[in-house]
Amino acid sequence: MEGGVEDVLRQLAPQVLGALVRRYGRFDLCEDAVQEALLTAALEWPGKGVPESPRGWLITVASRRMTDRLRAESSRRRRETTAATQAGPEELLAPAPDEDRPPEQDDTPTLLLLCCHPALSPASQVALTLRAVGGLTTAQIARAFLVPEATMAQRISRAKQSIKSAGARFSLPPEHERAERLRVVLQVLYLIFNEGYTATSGPDLYRAELTGEAIRLARALHRALPEGGEVAGLLALMLLTDARRRARTLPDGSLVPLAEQDRRLWDAASIEEGVALITDTLSRAPIGPYQLQAAIAAVHDEAARAEETDWPQILVLYELLEGLAPNPMVTLNRIVAVAMVRGAPAGLDLLATLEVDERMAGHHRLDAVRAHLLEMAGDRAAARASYRTAARLTTSLPEQRYLEARAARL
């Protein structure tokens, strides 16, 4: 029952917040009021049962909290200064003039755009998205990113203040801004998923609360924007990548590389859905980076055995991706594909081009790939040294243990 209640609350959270912000125009206070309503529901519903109209129940409770907050704020302001010298509550975030929209309309896309406002830093965009749209508590977000709860609370509070100061409105941005704002939203969801799928630090390789929220929010965005090629591409990429989750670790938490995974453990339904999504969007929409990454993931997932992987096709896709969205990580992955197609020496020759890239300085993946290619080439001593260097550089304990084990095996 509790799991079911939690799922309902997470689905309804953005709808309830959207309804309140549209009515009151105060994102910061509305978000707090909705969180209080969600907490009340989480405490009451498991025992009393989910009400007939859970959305209406939450809006009613949150509205009462909001009214109490506004009255308290108004009383405080009257005590501090005269009404003529202060702004009214509506000036902090003016509601958009679209009251004729259907009450049941999903406001998730609008909320995502608001939480990913350009006035916020990427870290604040991620935190606010998980809190306001994802429905995670501040404590859950803090645990996911391994920071104290007080630190995360301050980050979220500053994000709300930044939105207020920027004069943001609860509405879709102007047409000329939408493509860039959507790009930022997709990047934020991608960051959330990646941090959950391969945690950058800490004892766990995987954080299900982050990958689950990233996929759920990507689904909501895809429902709202079904024609968006990159939206579909990102959702497909998440599904095709997450499908391998059960095979990525052993019972003791040890990392299992892609080539050594038991593919019988892969989620066939997620693979089928992801392949269908990327096949459809590639046939009708302009090609973007997320679509290409999803296509690469699909090639991996469709191989029954690692030996059957179509590396020439993957190399072509990485070459297209590097031309469309160049960055050192894409180049590093292309080099691996080159090595798989043309041999380890060819990959090692190209790897030298990345060693002078300052963006890769101190990154463990460069040494990890070098170690892998040296092992393929038969240079065991050099491979062992590179594995050990990579192990020292990574902050992920599962990756560190894996790299040290590779070095020890050599």
Image (cartoon, rainbow, N blue to C red):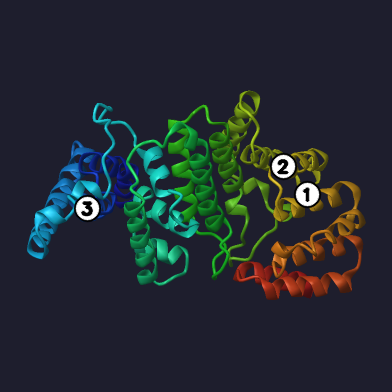
Q: In the structure shown, which secondary structural element does the residue marked by tag 2 occupy? A: helix
Q: Amino acid at mark 2?
A: Leu
The residue sitting at 88% across, 74% down in the picture is 381
Q: How far apart, in angstroms, are the residues tagged by discs 2 and 1?
A: 9 Å
Q: CA distance from mark 3 to mark 2?
A: 43 Å
Up-down: is 65 above or below 240? below
> Toward the viewer: 168 or 314?
168
272 or 227: nearer the viewer: 227
Mark 2 / mark 1, whichever is N-terminal: 2
Q: Which quadrant of the view contains residue 317? A: top right
Labels 2 & 1 near each other (Cβ < 8 A): yes
SS for dot 3: helix
| Label annotation for residue 334 | 1
Q: Position of residue 123 (x, y in %)?
A: 47, 59
Q: Which residue is mark 3?
A: 33
Q: Is residue 183 left or right of residue 97?
A: right
* For marks 3 and 1 on the same chain, the one whose residue lies earlier in the sequence: 3
Secondary structure under the numbered disc 1 in the rendered image: helix
Task: Work out whether residue 16 or residue 8 is closer to the camera in this orientation and state it.
Answer: 16
